[in-house]
Every structure is written in structure tokens, then in C-alpha cells.
Image (cartoon, rainbow, N blue to C red):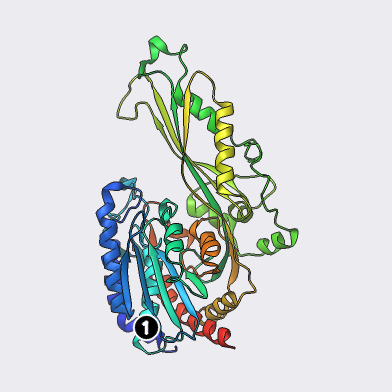
Amino acid sequence: MEDIKNYILNNKDRFIDELFGLIRIPSISAKSENKEDMRKAALYLKSAFINAGADMAEVMTSKGNPVIFAEKIINPQLPTILIYGHYDVMPAEPLDLWKSPPFEPEIRDEKIYARGADDDKGQLFMQIKAFEFMVKTDKLPCNVKFMVEGEEEVGSPSLEQFCIDNKELLKADIILVSDTGMYSKDIPSITTGLRGLAYWEIEVTGPSRDLHSGIFGGAVANPINVLSKIIADIIDENGKITIPGFYDDVHNVSQEERTLLSQAPFNETEFKKSIEVVELSGEVGYSTIERTGIRPTFDVCGIWGGYTGEGAKTVLPSKAYAKVSCRLVPNQNHEKIAKLFKDYIASVTPSSVKIVVKTLHGGQGYVCPIDTLAYKAAEKAYIKTFGKQPVPYRSGGSIPIISTFENVLGIKTILMGFGLESDAIHSPNENYPLYNFYKGIETIPYFYKYYTETFKA
């Protein structure tokens, strides 16, 4: 494996060109207008897998966007690693905040700037290029399968059935995912926990049409006012969520684990500086790392209604809308939380308006033990390439399908991510440092090596 650095050096320009080709395809799963782009991205990846050395690659149908499956089986007696990733990306709005067009990638200050640069096209491409290196240099130690979907950013609604329908095809010993991050450029980490997710859209209707706010104001309920109060009351003065039963199944992390979390490298001053806030907030009694890793949350992701154009329009709106989400912790069932949320909203809605709550998507949390063969192999891989022990890390983010893999396929997942908090995923000016991109390609082959050696021992 020692020649991986030379392979990267000799091929890095090609790697970037090929990644840019994928990034330029606006594969936004949340927008129906980008449906054809989803297929273009899938076909692009099919070619990438074949060129990298896969024995076969196929664009497969699902209930939603296509899934790409590829594999290289060198010996059925050897372990099989199944790599999961996604080619869909978040919408790029607000576009005016981007310093360069989101789907025209460019390199500035040794970083790739574009939507999907990190999440997950850049990190997925690390896996493809690490695989290419092992195949082209005859160093692949085990069997490899790839499953890449196009609906992760909308909750992977079609992938569970795809896994059920293709259980034999996806048979493997471990799932490897690069869709998470590290503490910092110099401090590698292995993600051992992910929060679950529940996401809703709320529609509040008052009068049958927009009204003159002078003639009707004060006599007719304003849907925006009502919605704003309902949302504001969901969080109390201590940062606790007020929905009855919300915390019933929350796993309370032991004091021992909380102590370990507190030892993780985290600079609160730098954290605030990086996002330009003066003060942090959240649930009383928990640190910032705990609030973003082991505790559930409620957030408004978008809210609108009435007149939002230039200038003034004195209107009492007919409707108001909001998109809201909860990040959930292990043991919390997203379907149960969805019912509790809907029941709560119905109980606090005044009779002066009508309200509809639509569940958009959801998923379970996930915890990965640190005593597995895969964890130990990943740990050795990071030590080999970074020269230091990786830190176990509970991510505040969600990859809803990970828990489904365990339930449907019966396979554990190891999360080897190389992103940084500063990569601004889901935000304008998403970026991915070239250092991390190349370091991922360098590290992944060692995971293959150490996992196979340990598996056979």
C-alpha cells in the first residue's frame, strides 16, 4: 500500500476532473425539475465504476431515483465490503450567497467549492478512487460491492424496499460509509453514533383569501401569528421540547460516556467564531458537544406566508407554512415521534384556524460499538496515515438508512468520514479541502487491508 501516495500524486488532476464532471450535474433529489439530472448522475457513476475496475456496474430501478450497484468479486471465500454513498445533493438556494455558481466547481485556497463537494460526491469519489488504486495495482485484498442511491437528502424513502428486494445481491460482511466528518484537519475521528430524524411541513389556514389588514386586522386570526406562537412554544426557557412524551424513550448517556465526550478536542471560542455568533444556546445542563450528539432537538427549517416581495403590502394572509424537523437519539422511534408531534399540534391549535401537518420523511438513529473488527481496522488505518489515534465521535447529523441496513440486511456499518465542520454542507459555499479528499483516498485502502487481515485471523 506504500505506493498509494505516488498513485494519488500521478493521478490527482484526473481525479479532480472526473469529480467535477459529477458535481456539474445538479442532482437535487428534492426538486422534481431535476429528475432527469438524477439519471444523468447515475449513468455517470456507472461509467466511473467500470473505469475504476468493477466487474459489473448497473443502474437499477427503485420506487424513486435510480440506485447504482457495482461489484468486484475476487474470491467468494474472502470478506465482502459493501460501500454505501449517495449522489443526490441539497438544493443550492439562496443562490445569491454563493461566491461561485454552485454547480460550476472551482478550487480556491486549496478547497473545492460546489454543491456536493463534500456531501457526498467528494467523499463518494474518495471511495471510488481508493478502489481504483487497489484494482489497478493488484492490491485489492477482498470482495467489494457498491450501492449508491439518489434520495438520501430526502430521507431515502425507496432504499429500504430496494434492500429487501435485493437482499442476496447486497450480501456483505460490513458496510463502509464516507458521509461524515472529522474533528479537525489534524484530528481524525470515527463516527460511532448518528441521530435520527423526523421532518414535517405545517400548513395553517385562516380566512378563505388574503384580507385587508386594516379592515379585518384585530377581528380575524392571522395564520402567521398563530403558527409563530405554536412553534415558539415548542421550546421552553430551558431549551427543552414541550411535546408530551417526547423524552420517554430517550437513551440517557452514562456519566462515564459523558466524561469521555468532554475529553474530545473542542474549542468553543473557535466554534463560535467559525459561524460568527457571540453566544451559543441549547438545552440547559448539557455541553455543546452533548447538545449536538446525544440529545434530541427541534428546529424550524423554513417558514413563509403572506407578502414577501419588495416594498409594503398591508395584507392579513390566508395561509402560513413551516418546515420543521427533530433530530432524534437512539431509542426514539421517528414514527412514534411523528404521532406525538401531530397530536400536540392538534391540541394547541385554536379553532380560529385550520391546520394540516404532513410528514415528509424520517429515520432512526444509529450507534456503532467500538469493539468490532471493523472499528479496530478503521482505527489502524487512521493511525497509519495520520500518525495518531482517531477519536470516537457521535455526530449530530442523520443518515436514516444506516439503521435500516442493520434491520434489513443484518450488517453493521463503519463510518469513516473525512469532512470538516467548515465545509458548510447544506449551506451556500459548500467546500471540501483537497487535503481531506486525497487523505481519504490514502486511508481507505488501509481499512481494506486491516479488515481483511483481521477477518481471516
| Residue type for callout 1 | Phe
**Quadrant location of the C terminus?**
bottom right
Q: Is residue 424 above or below residue 435?
A: above
Circle 1 Cα neighbour tier, 10 Å, few/some/many (<14 / 14–19 / ≥20): many
Is residue 328 shown to the viewer in this render? Answer: yes
Image coordinates of residue 300 in percent, x first then y, are 49, 40
Residue extending furthest toward the top: 215
- Tell which of 2 and 310 is nearer to you: 2
Identify the residue position indicated by label 1 in the image. Answer: 133
Image coordinates of residue 48 in percent, x first then y, are 29, 73
**Quadrant location of the N terminus?**
bottom left
Q: Quadrant of residue 268?
A: bottom right
Q: Secondary structure at mark 1?
A: helix
* Residue for point 63% across, 68% down: 369
* Residue for point 41% across, 54% down: 153
- Tell which of 277 and 339 is nearer to you: 339
* Residue for point 41% across, 88% down: 139
Q: Is residue 166 above or below residue 71?
A: above
Q: Is residue 394 left or right of residue 256?
A: left
Image coordinates of residue 52 in percent, x first then y, are 32, 79
Residue extending furthest toward the right: 255
Is residue 433 shown to the viewer in this render? Answer: no
Q: Is residue 180 above or below residue 94?
A: below
